Amino acid sequence: MRLLLLFVALVAAPAWSAARPDAKALAALPNLSVHAPNFVASGRLEAGDIAALRKAGIRTVIDLSDDEETPDFDEATAVGDAGMAYRNLPIDGGNGLTRENVERFDKLVAAAGDTPTLIHCGSSNRVGALVAMRAALIEGQSLEAAIETGRSWGLKGLEPIVREQLAAVSARTRSAGGKAGPAQALRFPRIAMAGGVYAMPAGTLMPAANLEHRLVIDAASGDTTAGGILRRLDAAARAVNLYALAGVAPQRLKVAVVLHGKATSAALDEKSYQAHFSTGNPNASLLGALHEAGVEVFVCGQALSHAGYAAGEVRADVRVALSAMTALVSLQADGYSLIP
């Protein structure tokens, strides 16, 4: 019997080893990470990468990107022609981080079993986001443990949304006495990294789509979200997403933010923020996204001087105002509604 068990173990050992992808053969893939026993994650694939996948022993490819992201490369056909299985679950940035997609992703991972499998998107950010949400919602990891798991798979810019989604699930669970409430997903129609909103049923009072809307957000608080960004900047992103959800065209919406008080430092550029705080500006990406969405961000010149910051240290997409007081008065005189 012992000889038989030894024979079985010796036969089984090579099969287990064969289930581990050859990471060296995949070294050229962007943002590569290896996860025992049989998974690897990466950024976008190109036609020249397919042979390397096969050489590395990959047998299944799970693609989280949309065909439109690589119009000149038919990944499904290329992977299939190389004798590998291809699975596609398109994740549209923050909008795709839903409970339903997490469950679909979990089924794909379970179906892969011990098969050497590559999971990829454009940068591995979406991979890490789904892995983090799966770790929390399916495997029961704590929020911080799930975030760390996601980071090891490539989670970066989508982390604030992952935190917001998981916090929303936790809140529903508490309000339902320990049982998860309705799993309506947050949506991010214009700004994908912050300011998630929920769809409302027909008959809900909505902003008029044929009118111009102007609002200014008074941002003096230093309070931050679970993702580490200023809550008032998150509120600005939420305003943009709310009006987009209501069908208001971008050219009919004007949003301004006035930074002052404890929010002043958010206006600093990366180099200056690093010099003052020995870390990067956690609001940098969101400020860039707000600028791209047409949001005007001002910072109080008086607050800058009081804090010891120079006007030359302010980001290029943030405008210095004489003061927060005068900026708020001027904007309201120009038809902006104050959001305190």
Image (spheres, rainbow, N blue to C red):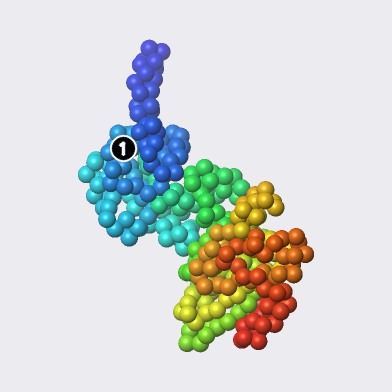
Picture coordinates of residue 90, whole percent (x, y) = 38, 57
Say which of 55 and 336 sits in front.
Answer: 336
Q: Residue placed at 29% from the left, 58% from the top?
A: 71
Q: Nearer the viewer, residue 99 or 81?
A: 81
> Compared with residue 232, is residue 72 higher up or lower down, i.e. above or below?
above
Label 1 secondary element: helix
Note whether 40 is above or below 312 in the view shown. above
**Image coords of residue 51 (percent x, y):** 27, 38
Q: Is residue 322 above or below residue 63?
A: below
Would you say residue 108 is visible in this rendering? Answer: no
Residue drawn at (55%, 72%) of the image = 295
Q: Where's the N terminus, which quadrant?
A: top left
The vertical placement of 27 against 295, above or below, is: above
Q: Locate residue 284, reporting x and y percent.
A: 58, 59
Tag 1 residue: 52
Comparing 24 with 39, the one in front is: 24
- Name of the residue lying farthest toward the top: 3
- Picture coordinates of residue 286 (x, y %)? 56, 62
Residue furthest toward the right? Answer: 306
Q: Quadrant of residue 53?
A: top left
Please report the residue visible at 62 percent of the width from the left and 83 percent of the height from the top. Answer: 336
Residue 303 appears anywhere in the view: yes
Amino acid type at circle 1 is Ala
- Count of number-bearing discs: 1
